[in-house]
Image (tube, rainbow, N blue to C red):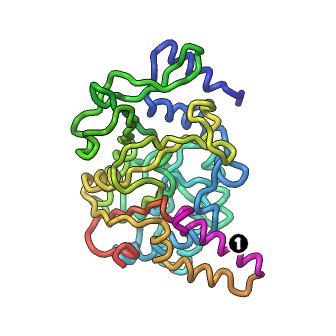
Amino acid sequence: MTAGKLKERLIRRIEAQGPMTVAEYMTACLADPEDGYYKTREPFGAKGDFITAPEVSQMFGELIGAFCLAAHERHGNPSSFRLVEIGPGRGTLMADLLRMASLRPDFLKAADLWLVETSPRLRQIQEQTLKKAGFTPSFADRIEDVPEGPMLLVANEFFDALPIHQYVKAREGWLERLVGTGPDGSLQFGAGTARLPDADLPPHLQEAEPGTILETQPASNAIAETIAARLVQQGGTALFIDYGYLKTAHGDTLQALRNHSYDNVLSHPGEADLTAHVNFEALASAARKGGAKVFPPLTQGEFLLRLGLLQRAGTLGAKKSHSAQEEIRDAVERLAAPQQMGELFKVLAISGNAGSLVPFDD
């Protein structure tokens, strides 16, 4: 990819058609067919731009596997169900999940494995990862394309990459934030004329100061509602894990990551990963709108500790070298410590039917 190629195209588009919304900018940066970030780069791992929890340690995916085993049992051990991951990265989480699930042969026999992934390049990587683990996935572009039937679904760091809208408080109301060009032709933020509907404004933000930014996530909410409606109609449980906040709040959380460092959001379109914090209150509300039972969210640290992270770390480190045990301890800290991923990341579970669900009912 030619450096700056997408940026040049976006500037020409803005000059011809006018400023674009933040959601349109994110979509172009991440999913442009020619120069989008996920179409052209290897984002994951030490050689990419960021490291996700499954890449930190196998324990993460294994504990998600333990959760899925409990959820399968909760639903009466159906003899056939769809095991689905949306946004499966390199397939690492699913490979670790299935290794844990091998403790229950009836679970593996019943599972029909589906990955929801639009990138042909990432599909190849996922297929290779799971082939090494002895599994062959089917692929879908959208959750709607996964065949009917009961479903256990996992989404780890999926919603944070979906496009958001931003609104800025002005004297005349909340105006949509746009990406345009400045006098020197560079990309810059500005405000348009479209207003945030009053119904979408939480009461506690009515008196926000001018210049305050509020983010909305209609794309994420629509997917959560779709998944919820399917779970109600056909049975199953879904698990959403992402970084974000539990209650709607103001603030600009849009960020760019490039070579494991923060980057200016407008500097390198298509060459940096763009994400925003997930509003779990809005996600839960959308799931309830779809009819699902929504369990009170947990922090990632609490979720993993309740599932037995410390016990699994002890088993994994038994009879290992001191250095290997230190690596395992470091992984536990990174996954669960409040000052690392433990507090920032939240876990939301939704289900098609009522009743308790481990570990949310602990």
Q: Is residue 323 above or below residue 92?
A: below
Q: Looking at the picture, which amino acid does disc 1 mark?
A: Glu
User: In the shown orientation, is residue 94 left or right of residue 362?
Assistant: right
Relative image position of residue 67 (x, y in whole percent) = 45, 73
**Going 39% across and 76% down the picture, which residue do you hit?**
358
Q: Which element is circle 1 on? A: helix
Seen from the viewer's position, the closer of residues 106 and 268 is: 268
User: In the shown orientation, is residue 125 left or right of residue 361?
Assistant: right
Dominant secondary structure of the residues highlighted in magenta in the image: helix
Quadrant position of the N terminus in the picture? top right
Total marks shown come to 1
State the image quarter where residue 41 is shown: top right
Q: Residue furthest bottom?
A: 319
Magenta residues, start to end = 322-342
Q: Which residue is label 1 attached to?
A: 327
Q: Is residue 329 magenta?
A: yes
Relative image position of residue 183 (x, y in whole percent) = 55, 13
Seen from the viewer's position, the closer of residues 289 and 326 is: 326
**Going 51% across and 79% down the picture, which residue do you hit?**
308
Seen from the viewer's position, the closer of residues 63 and 137 is: 63
Q: Is residue 149 magenta?
A: no
Q: Is residue 306 above or below residue 60?
A: below
**Residue 68 visible to the viewer:** no
**Residue 111 visible to the viewer:** yes
**Going 32% across and 50% down the picture, which residue do you hit?**
282
Q: Residues within 10 Å of mark 1 (few under 14, many from 20)?
A: some
Q: Residue furthest front?
A: 209
**Going 28% across and 60% down the picture, which residue do you hit?**
292
Relative image position of residue 278 (x, y in whole percent) = 43, 50
Relative image position of residue 173 (x, y in whole percent) = 28, 29
Quadrant position of the C terminus in the picture? bottom left
